[in-house]
Amino acid sequence: MPDLASFVFTLTASADTTVPAYTARILHASFLRWLERDHPELVAALHDANHPRPYTLSNLQGNLHPHGERFKIPHEKVKP
């Protein structure tokens, strides 16, 4: 049986900002760029082939406010 892992990233906005309502494409691209730094051959195999992916990504969740076709993300101070 394959090993399973879960990663949860906590993101904060350094200033009030907006993002597209559907953020999974942005997160997918960011995930592949992150991997590409150390494993470019893995990224090519994950991205180029038309097959089921061994990973999944979800949209951003949390303090998001609808703002037309986008979500507004307010600046939040990070608690120590």
Image: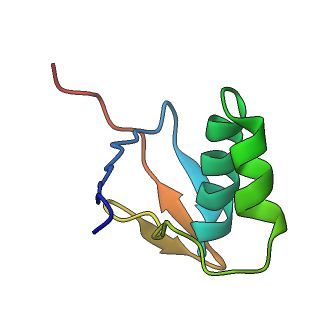
In the image, 43: left or right of 71? Answer: right
Q: By what rule are the colours in the image chosen?
A: rainbow
Residue 60 pos. (x, y %): 44, 63
Residue under the image location 66 percent in, 27 percent down: 38
Residue under the image location 61 percent in, 80 percent down: 52
Residue 16 pos. (x, y %): 52, 43
Q: Look at the image and tell me in which quarter the N terminus lies.
A: bottom left
Front-most of 22 and 32?
32
Front-most of 7 and 65?
7
Residue 49 pos. (x, y %): 80, 71
Residue under the image location 60 percent in, 48 percent down: 31
List the single residue furthest toward the left.
Answer: 80
Front-most of 21 and 16?
21
Q: Is residue 12 above or below residue 20?
A: above
Q: Look at the image and tell me in which quarter the C terminus lies.
A: top left
Front-most of 69 and 7?
7
List the single residue furthest toward the front.
Answer: 1
In the image, 33: left or right of 24? Answer: right
Q: Is residue 14 above or below residue 48?
A: above
Can I make out residue 52 in this image? Answer: yes
Q: Is residue 2 above or below residue 43?
A: below
Can I make out residue 23 in this image? Answer: no
Residue 48 pos. (x, y %): 84, 65
Residue under the image location 52 percent in, 34 percent down: 15
